[in-house]
């Protein structure tokens, strides 16, 4: 009888937790339909950022394969390539570490409500971070937010992260710390769309400039129904030799 009462109590507690999460507007992990979120993921925050930084499908000209993530740090966008020159675009905030690296990598780890381990340099200078020298559990105060994607080159951790944030105002801005942050709702959405092994391209400033030029040309081409002008390679010119016919030879 005691065992049955304990089981009923656990069932009631579970129902109470589910009801509390539903009332508070917490996000249930809808993608798999059965995992309950231990903390709130606000969907209302999606409307609190400027329209251009809200998740949306856009035209994006790229030679990258569908399923590739492209991080445009200069313009504060992350693209998930879907094919036929289209992509899902997310607004991002970029921290100091986010600007410090560019290149190609692969997602090797995906973590829900990840543990945060502050860098040794931060632990040394920041008493608050020093409290978590051995790691901060996932939750509403964790800087990595609701989800984290870990980028590797081969077996080497790049220390580059794509993660969630509770700081809505940081989306679309350069911030003092961290890598690439999305709204928690967007981080959860991206997490469900990409598997481990997903290729990621982080554009450097030069890459951003070239990508913008390509997109501008493509837009002009469509707007004016023109084709790109042909570019011919520059040929090496033969120097002209001038003879002085007044010279007695």
Image: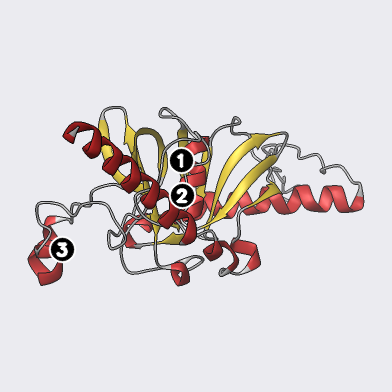
Query: Earlier along the polypeptide chain: callout 2 or callout 3?
Result: 3
Residue in the picture at 48% in, 51% down: 27
Viewer-nearest residue: 191 or 217: 191
Quadrant including the N terminus: top left
Q: How far apart, in angstroms, are the residues tagged by discs 1 and 2?
A: 6 Å
Q: CA distance from mark 3 to mark 1?
A: 28 Å
Residue pointed to by mark 2: 187
Q: Is residue 75 left or right of residue 167?
A: right
In front: label 2 or label 3: 2
Please provide percent x and percent y for residue 170: 44, 69
Residue 95 is situated, as x and y percent measured from the top left of the image, at 36, 62
Residue 143 lies, with reference to residue 197, above or below; the image says below
Mark 1 and 2 residues: CB-CB less than 8 Å, in contact?
yes
- The answer to whether residue 126 is seen in the rendering is no
Crowdedness near tag 1: few (<14), some (14–19) or many (≥20) residues, C-alpha within 10 Å: many
Residue holding disc 1: 191
The image shows residue 9, relative to residue 145, as above or below, that is: above
Q: Residue at x 40, y 54 (%)?
A: 164
Quarter that holds the C terminus = top right
Mark 3, residue position: 122
- Answer above or below: position of 58 versus 124: above
Q: Residue furthest right?
A: 225
Q: Circle 2 sits in a helix, a strand or a loop, which is it?
A: helix
């Amino acid at each position: 009888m005691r065992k049955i009462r304990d089981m009923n109590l656990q069932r009631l507690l579970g129902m109470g937790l589910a009801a509390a999460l539903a009332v508070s507007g917490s996000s249930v992990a809808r993608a798999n339909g059965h995992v309950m979120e231990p903390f709130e993921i606000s969907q209302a925050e999606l409307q609190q950022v400027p329209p251009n930084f809200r998740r949306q499908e856009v035209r994006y000209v790229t030679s990258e394969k569908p399923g590739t993530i492209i991080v445009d740090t200069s313009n504060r966008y992350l693209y998930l390539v879907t094919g036929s020159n289209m992509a899902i675009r997310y607004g991002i905030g970029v921290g100091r570490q986010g600007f410090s690296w560019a290149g190609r990598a692969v997602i090797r780890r995906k973590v829900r409500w990840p543990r945060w381990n502050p860098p040794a340099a931060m632990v040394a200078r920041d008493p608050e971070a020093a409290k978590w020298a051995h790691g901060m559990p996932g939750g509403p105060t964790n800087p990595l937010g609701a989800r984290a994607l870990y980028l590797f080159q081969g077996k080497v951790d790049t220390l580059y992260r794509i993660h969630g944030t509770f700081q809505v105002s940081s989306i679309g801005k350069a911030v003092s710390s961290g890598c690439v942050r999305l709204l928690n709702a967007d981080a959860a959405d991206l997490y469900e769309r990409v598997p481990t092994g997903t290729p990621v391209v982080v554009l450097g400033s030069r890459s951003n400039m070239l990508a913008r030029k390509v997109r501008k040309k493509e837009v002009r081409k469509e707007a004016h129904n023109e084709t790109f002008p042909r570019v011919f390679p520059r040929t090496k010119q033969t120097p002209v030799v001038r003879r002085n016919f007044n010279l007695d030879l």
